């Protein structure tokens, strides 16, 4: 007989310093220059920083962080600091849900404009941001240090929230 397990579910959650290790692990899967758990702990402790996570609840009762988005705001502007989804969980709509929730929270807090920087070669991220409505307003030269040496430019994207 094939055992039956109720399907796992995912849910959005506000993250805190206790999530720093998992954040560093997920970030390390997504970026060539990983941030340390300590970096995340101090970022999250910042007054103007928001962190939303996607947790996957297993049928056995424990939950695991599978993605996150971090943003910072000042006055009526915000920037997306980082977003990443575990490789094993990409392509399931988690990135979109995380961005939508971060933007919903920023809108609620009366933020008018949101900025972010993205590597033009990062097809998945560029497509995600454009679908949401971000538009290019500039670029930053030599922003990304390449692992093998050299540097690449970043696109600066903006979204008007209200
Ligand atoms: C970018 C990232 C967060 C997207 O997360 P995700 O959960 O896989 O994305 P979703 O499944 O929600 O997809 C949302 C949209 O993103 C785009 N997208 C996602 N994966 C894509 C891929 N492999 N190729 C092209 N577009 C892609 C699509 O437009 C997609 O919309 P669609 O499903 O209607 O086609 C994820 O790829 C990631 O963690 N990458 C590594 C870290 C990173 O690059 N962060 C961004 C730095 S600026």
Image (cartoon, grey):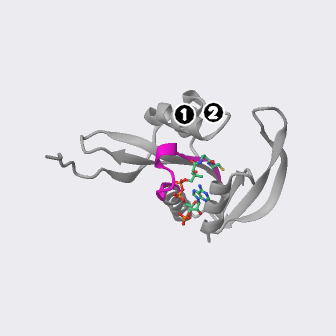
- Location of residue 59 in the rendering, given as x and y in whole percent from the top left corner: 25, 45
Viewer-proximal residue among 126 and 3? 3
Q: Characterize the local packing of mark 2: few (<14), some (14-19) or many (20 or more) Cα atoms within 10 angstroms.
A: some
Residue 46 magenta-drawn? no
Which residue: 30% across, 44% down? Answer: 58
Residues at badges 1 and 2 in contact (C-beta under 8 Å)? yes
Which residue: 54% across, 29% down? Answer: 37
Considering every residue shown, the one lying at the far left of the view is 1
Mark 1 and mark 2 lie on one chain; the one further toward the N terminus is 1
Viewer-proximal residue among 72 and 85? 85
Q: Which residue is mark 2?
A: 34
Residues in magenta, as a range: 78-95
Residue 93 magenta-drawn? yes
Viewer-proximal residue among 89 and 81? 89
Q: Residue 152, relative to residue 97: is it above or below?
A: above
Residue 24 is marked as: 1
Q: Residue 119, relative to residue 41: is it above or below?
A: below
- Location of residue 31 in the rendering, given as x and y in whole percent from the top left corner: 64, 39
């Amino acid at each position: 007989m094939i055992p039956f397990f109720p399907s796992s579910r995912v849910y959005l959650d506000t993250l805190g310093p206790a999530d720093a290790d998992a954040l560093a692990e997920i970030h390390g899967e997504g970026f060539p220059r990983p941030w340390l758990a300590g970096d995340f702990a101090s970022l999250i402790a910042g007054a103007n920083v928001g962190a939303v996570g996607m947790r996957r609840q297993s049928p056995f009762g424990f939950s695991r962080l599978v993605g996150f988005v971090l943003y910072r705001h000042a006055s009526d502007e915000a920037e997306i600091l980082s977003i990443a989804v575990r490789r094993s969980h990409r392509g399931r709509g988690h990135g979109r849900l995380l961005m939508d929730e971060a933007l919903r929270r920023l809108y609620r807090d009366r933020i008018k404009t949101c900025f972010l920087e993205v590597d033009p070669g990062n097809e998945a991220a560029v497509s995600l941001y454009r679908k949401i409505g971000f538009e290019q307003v500039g670029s930053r030269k030599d922003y990304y240090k390449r692992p093998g040496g050299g540097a690449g430019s970043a696109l600066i994207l903006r979204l008007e929230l209200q």
